[in-house]
Every structure is written in structure tokens, then in C-alpha cells.
Image: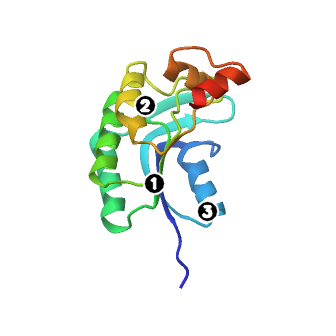
Amino acid sequence: MTTYYRALTIAGSDSGGGAGIQADLKTFSALGCFGMSAITALTAQNTRVVTGIFPAPPEFIGEQIDAVMADIGADAVKIGMLHSPEVIETVAAKLKQWACPNVVVDPVMISKSGDKLLLDDAVTALKERLLPLATVITPNLPEASVLLGRPVETAGDMADAAR
């Protein structure tokens, strides 16, 4: 009997298929993992622009996480777009409740096309509630700059930021 690692992605849905839940599930499948999802928002986007964001209610996000964890469980959790402080609080509480291991946080703040995906007042919640629960954090340079409150531009800046 084949055993698969179980990976839960908690992120937004990208209608263009290049990011978010769609990209995570493709990656999980390519790596031989059983992928599950909790959708935090529906987005209308393509490779050029995000035209709309419809956030899922925090309570429903919590229900999705509970449904997966109560039955299937997860060996790892990958977190992407969370959008608001309330969603971040809900996800952080569920990670603690279920003692989720191997948490990867991609602090999605801006789409590749430059559209804002994280509300300004959510950055503090992200830093204080979610990042301490992470095993690995995968910010890009603009996200690292926001999280650190200083520019991250040079190789030296990157090395300092990684500490």
C-alpha cells in the first residue's frame, strides 16, 4: 500500500491557475503528495491583472480547516493569501488548535501584476500571530522589505533578512 504525504494549502483561488490554490495543488501532485485546500478568497485574475477579490468569511475558512484536519489530517501546511487580520487570526488559531506541523508561510502581499492582496492593517497580525507558527517563511524581496520595515535589495540585505 502506497502512503502519501498529506499537504494542506490555505490560500486564495487564482482563476488564471498560475498562483494560489491551483498552483499549490499542482505542485503537491507533482511531488507525489495528497493535496487538500481551504480557500481564503476567490480572485478574478490572469497573468496581467487582478480584477476582483471576494474574501471567504473567516468562520468558513475555519470550517474548511476543521473538516480536513478532523478526518484526513496534514503532514504539512502551506499558507498563501490571507487578505485580512480576521482571516490571519482564524488561521493562526486553527494551526494551534490542530497542532499543525511543518508550516510554510508565503506572506502573499502583492500579485505578480502589482495588485495589492493583503490589507494594510493585516501586516501586524501576520507578523505577530502567524509568522511565529511558521517552520519556513518564503517572502519575495518586496514582502521581506515590508515585514522587516527596511529595504531588502542587495545580496547583503538578503543575507541579513534570512537571519
Q: Identify the residue position indicated by label 1 in the image.
A: 37
Give the camera-side residue of 161 and 90. Answer: 161
Q: Residue furthest bottom?
A: 1
Q: Is residue 97 left or right of residue 49?
A: left
Is residue 128 visible in the rendered image? The answer is yes
Which residue lies at the image location 31% right of the left edge and 39% below the top edge? 57
User: What percent of the width, then of the height, locates residue 69?
Assistant: 34, 60
Classify 80 as above or below 25.
above
Classify 8 as above or below 112.
below
Q: Residue 37 sits in which quadrant?
A: bottom left
For the C terminus, the quadrant is top right
Whole-angstrom CA distance, mark 1 to mark 2, is: 16 Å
Q: Is residue 85 left or right of residue 12?
A: left
Mark 1 Cα shell of 10 Å, populated few (<14), some (14-19), many (≥20): many
Which residue lies at the image location 39% right of the left edge and 25% below the top edge? 122
* Mark toward the start of the polypeptide (2 vs 3): 3
Residue 29's mark?
3
Q: Hey, what amino acid is under mark 1?
A: Ser
Q: Residue 51 sits in which quadrant?
A: top right
User: What percent of the width, then of the height, locates residue 88?
Assistant: 36, 35
Classify 72 as above or below 111.
below
* Colour mode of the rendering: rainbow
Mark 3 Cα shell of 10 Å, populated few (<14), some (14-19), many (≥20): few
Q: Identify the residue position indicated by label 2 in the image.
A: 83
Q: Hey, what amino acid is under mark 2?
A: His
